[in-house]
Image: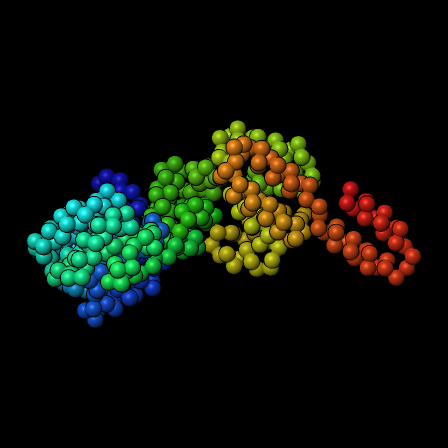
């Protein structure tokens, strides 16, 4: 048997397998059980969160020879054909490339001859917001008088671009971005089933990089496995994903703490020389700072659950001890701004260098706090001159 990529092999087969969209599959299940499936749905949500997958599961649930059922068998001809994508009962149309009124008319004619083998015909129009105005009008006509046993699923990443007239004839389901924790848990289940060993932090990196898309996370997992084999270490996964190593950020923060400008600038040079992307570098620095900040708050790192292990949390705690919480906050703000400006910068390397220098020259708010304390203590006596001297010393 040939190698099947994870994204296909682990594509959800039943409602239970859809990750992180319980609010939607729950409603759909009840609709099937009560025989109240609507004629038209709008599935919204970012890419790779399960819109078309859910549409296909719905098609199988309705057309399974043992159905309609909330748990399609996966064995019968209808189930198998829909799974393999060869069923005539499921039509998937790309709205971006079939966006004209003629395309929609053709679709309507096709549906006219429908209801062949299966009891239901499910028409999925992907990226439906790309349809032209006249195509939407033609679609509206169809939705106004829906053919028997045809179910429309309009999938889109941009629901606001769908006319209100269409909206009002559909049930709308909003697919959520899946949290990194949920994705990491899903990946660990897959790794266990596939006999792949892994560092939790390696899976957390993949989950973060996928930005809420389960499909993306599976492609990244594939990529990582083809590079690392059947054991995923954090270090290797970092390099597969093009992420800068934690050790680089540890070194940078150490240099910032010690106000060692030359060494800090050199680290940027080296990172560029190693072929890393500057945007990736800054994003990683942001994540690192977030961990440092959370390490200051008792229990906050642990609450993030799966992605930080106890040993590592301790290292972050030690590292963050060198900085005041308020300083870390200000640093986070400086880096956040840099990350935004980076997109428009004509000279990104300089922007990053300036950012790192800003972090170094950041006046320690800890010493300012000390100054205030000093001033308060000396407030009653005649030692104000001494305090000013202290201020100078601290600021310089
Ligand atoms: Zn079946």
Left or right placement of residue 127 versus residue 345 in this view? left
Q: Which residue is drawn at 53% across and 34% down?
A: 348
Q: Toward the viewer: 109 or 250?
A: 109
- Residue farthest along the bottom direction in this orientation: 34
Total marks drawn?
0
Quarter occupied by the C terminus: top right
Q: Residue at x 28, y 53 (%)?
A: 155
Q: Position of residue 227 (x, y in %)?
A: 39, 36
Q: Which residue is drawn at 15% across and 61% down?
A: 146
Q: Where is residue 77 in the image (x, y as percent from the top left)?
A: 12, 54
Q: Is residue 35 above or below residue 96?
A: below
Q: Residue at x 60, y 58 (%)?
A: 297
Q: Determine which quarter of the picture holds residue 38.
A: bottom left
Q: Toward the viewer: 144 or 79?
A: 144
* Residue 254 visible in the snapshot: no
- Residue farthest along the top direction in this orientation: 273
Q: Is residue 359 above or below residue 39?
A: above
Left or right placement of residue 160 versus residue 260 in this view? left
Q: Determine which quarter of the picture holds residue 96.
A: top left
Colour convention of the picture: rainbow
Left or right placement of residue 307 versus residue 326 in this view? left
Q: Toward the viewer: 214 or 186?
A: 214
* Residue 168 visible in the snapshot: yes
Q: Where is residue 252 in the image (x, y as percent from the top left)?
A: 61, 39
Quarter occupied by the N terminus: top left
């Amino acid at each position: 048997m040939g190698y099947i990529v994870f994204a296909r092999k682990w594509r959800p087969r039943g409602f239970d397998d859809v990750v992180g969209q319980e609010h939607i599959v729950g409603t759909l299940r009840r609709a099937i059980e009560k025989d109240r499936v609507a004629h038209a749905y709008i599935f919204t949500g970012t890419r790779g969160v399960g819109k078309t997958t859910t549409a296909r599961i719905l098609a199988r649930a309705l057309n399974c020879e043992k159905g309609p059922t909330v748990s399609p068998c996966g064995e019968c001809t209808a189930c198998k054909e829909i799974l393999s994508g060869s069923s005539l009962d499921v039509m998937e149309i790309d709205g971006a490339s079939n966006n004209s009124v003629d395309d929609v008319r053709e679709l309507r004619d096709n549906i006219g001859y429908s209801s062949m083998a299966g009891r239901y015909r499910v028409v999925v129009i992907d990226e439906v917001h790309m349809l032209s105005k006249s195509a939407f009008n033609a679609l509206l006509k169809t939705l106004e008088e829906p053919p028997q046993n045809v179910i429309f699923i309009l999938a889109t990443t941009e629901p606001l671009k769908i006319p209100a007239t269409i909206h009002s004839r559909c049930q709308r389901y909003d697919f959520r971005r899946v949290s990194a924790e949920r994705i990491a848990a899903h990946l660990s289940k897959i790794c266990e089933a596939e006999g792949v060993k892994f560092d939790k932090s390696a899976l957390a990196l993949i989950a973060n990089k996928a930005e809420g898309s389960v499909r993306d996370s599976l492609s990244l997992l594939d990529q990582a496995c083809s590079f690392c084999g059947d054991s995923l270490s954090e270090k290797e996964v970092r390099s597969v994903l093009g992420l800068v190593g934690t050790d680089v950020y540890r070194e940078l923060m150490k240099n910032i703490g010690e106000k060692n400008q030359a060494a800090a600038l050199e680290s940027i040079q080296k990172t560029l020389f190693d072929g890393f992307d500057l945007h990736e570098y800054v994003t990683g620095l942001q994540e690192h700072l977030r961990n440092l900040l959370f390490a200051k708050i008792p229990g906050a790192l642990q609450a993030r659950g799966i992605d930080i292990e106890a040993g590592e949390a301790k290292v972050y705690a030690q590292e963050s001890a060198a900085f005041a919480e308020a300083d870390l906050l200000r640093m986070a703000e400086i880096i956040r701004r840099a990350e935004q400006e980076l997109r428009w910068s004509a000279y990104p390397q300089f922007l990053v260098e300036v950012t790192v220098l800003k972090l170094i020259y950041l006046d320690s708010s800890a010493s300012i706090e000390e100054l205030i304390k000093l001033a308060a203590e000396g407030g009653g006596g005649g030692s104000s001159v001494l305090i000013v001297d202290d201020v100078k010393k601290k600021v310089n």
